[in-house]
Amino acid sequence: MSAASRRPPFGPPLVFVATLDRPALNDADAHHLGRVLRLRAGDVLTAADGAGRWRECTYRATAQLEISGEVFEEPMPEPPITIAFALTKADKPELVVQKLTELGVDRVVAFRAARSIVLWDEAKAARNVERWRSVAREAAMQSRRSRLPIIEPISTFAEVAGRPGAALSVAGGAPPGLHLPTVLVGPEGGWSPEEDATPMPRVAFGDHVLRAETAAITACSVVAAIRSRLAGDLSHPDAS
Amino acid sequence: MSAASRRPPFGPPLVFVATLDRPALNDADAHHLGRVLRLRAGDVLTAADGAGRWRECTYRATAQLEISGEVFEEPMPEPPITIAFALTKADKPELVVQKLTELGVDRVVAFRAARSIVLWDEAKAARNVERWRSVAREAAMQSRRSRLPIIEPISTFAEVAGRPGAALSVAGGAPPGLHLPTVLVGPEGGWSPEEDATPMPRVAFGDHVLRAETAAITACSVVAAIRSRLAGDLSHPDAS
């Protein structure tokens, strides 16, 4: 039976569970809800499966949650938004993943650009992607999203640039829009001449020079606002 | 004589000086340009007065800059954007001020909301506002803005809510727009019932629950994108 379409409520906390049929908290979430958010037995919360399905439950001060509502499905936003960002330094990717998740991103992919300063071996790359998935999970709970964004493995410029609907973020680019829901954001040092010469649409998100992480966040802000009909789409599909 | 209207170039570094007639670097900027950015004698840079006027200069590896271009004035964006954010914890305001400056904010004001957790005495408030002004100066240089945003003293909800063109940022609000260029962003705990009941326009910037700092950043992103004609204005002036 398919679930009725509805968004999770903003009020109660949202937590991810392995199954909505027998929703149970993992140790970390049990600690967070009980000790940090100080939930009490009888409080209502939302249990979600991470894939868009959720139901109201009641907290009983144990790991097992009591089911108190039917299963709904959060509508899938159209089009899905992908933010592809050049690998950058330090803890910036964690800030980017957290903010993009709150803002409604559907896919996040870090890629190696010509001027990416960071060089990770396979093991370190895998550890970082796992860490970002954990950051996205926390941010999704905080922002009441029942569907987790997909945090992809680290990719290459050529691969992300070749995706349908992909646009390069550049100063002085054209207005972004829903026919270009995949945005590539460059590293601090900017695009290399070869990357910059790639024949693909070019979009802009502001009038000034933006730090790499600011560009990724504002790209998602603006495209998501257009998708939510909070701002108009001024892009020209024919121009791409 | 009035200066011709032109934006500073994105390429060369931008630095603030006390006067464009005899532009000279302060010690911190001299260190930054020489040791961090590794400028060499003969390199071009932009000297700006912080109020929108700037000129091309040549670095001579001393504090005194050589004038190499006439004085221009960066166009004043219309309407000016004000982001008013509820005082919040820790180093979040610094992140907010940095990002808003890059995104083109004109005025930033922190205010005490009913649920603001932070309570500062006069001296601490003044120290923090000074610190934010320093953060804004650095961010303006990095983003090639010749006009510094105004970082106001800490205010109250009632004062900022009473400004012309002010709107309350709330989940489920109306589309933002240029007739509402002053946006109030609440604290982590949300607006109090009294604040929420204030008769004023209400705007939204996304579909999910946003952290306070994310709400401030995305509010500026979206309104600035509309102002730059990178997204359309879907607001209804009559509705406010």
Image: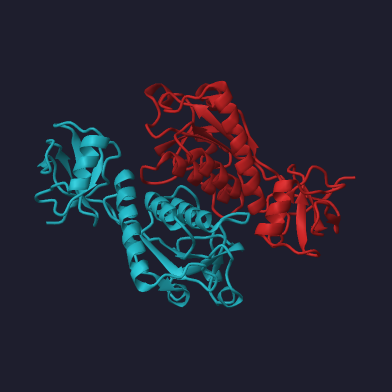
Chain colours: A cyan, B red
Q: Considering depth in this image, is B15 or B37 the residue closer to the camera? A: B37
Question: Residue B104 location in percent, x, y?
Answer: 61, 47
Question: Residue A102 location in percent, x, y?
Answer: 38, 49
Question: Residue A93 location in percent, x, y?
Answer: 43, 58
Q: Considering depth in this image, is B99 or B4 the residue closer to the camera? A: B99
Q: Is any part of residue A115 visible from this angle? A: yes
- Give the residue displayed 22% in from the left and 45% down from the top: A29
B122 on left or right of B21: left
Q: Is residue A220 above or below residue B216?
A: below
Q: Is residue B153 above or below residue A151?
A: above
Q: Is residue B143 above or below residue B38?
A: above
B50 on left or right of A46: right
A23 on left or right of B54: left
Q: Disc count in the image?
A: 0
Going by the picture, which residue comes out furthest to the right?
A: B1
- Give the residue displayed 58% in from the left and 38% down from the top: B181
Q: Is residue B139 above or below residue A172?
A: above
- Give the residue displayed 59% in from the left and 32% down from the top: B129
- In the rendered view of the protein, which quadrant contains the N terminus of chain A? bottom left
* Displayed quadrant of residue A58: top left
Q: Is any part of residue B154 visible from this angle? A: no
A141 on left or right of B81: left
Q: Considering depth in this image, is A148 or B120 the residue closer to the camera? A: B120
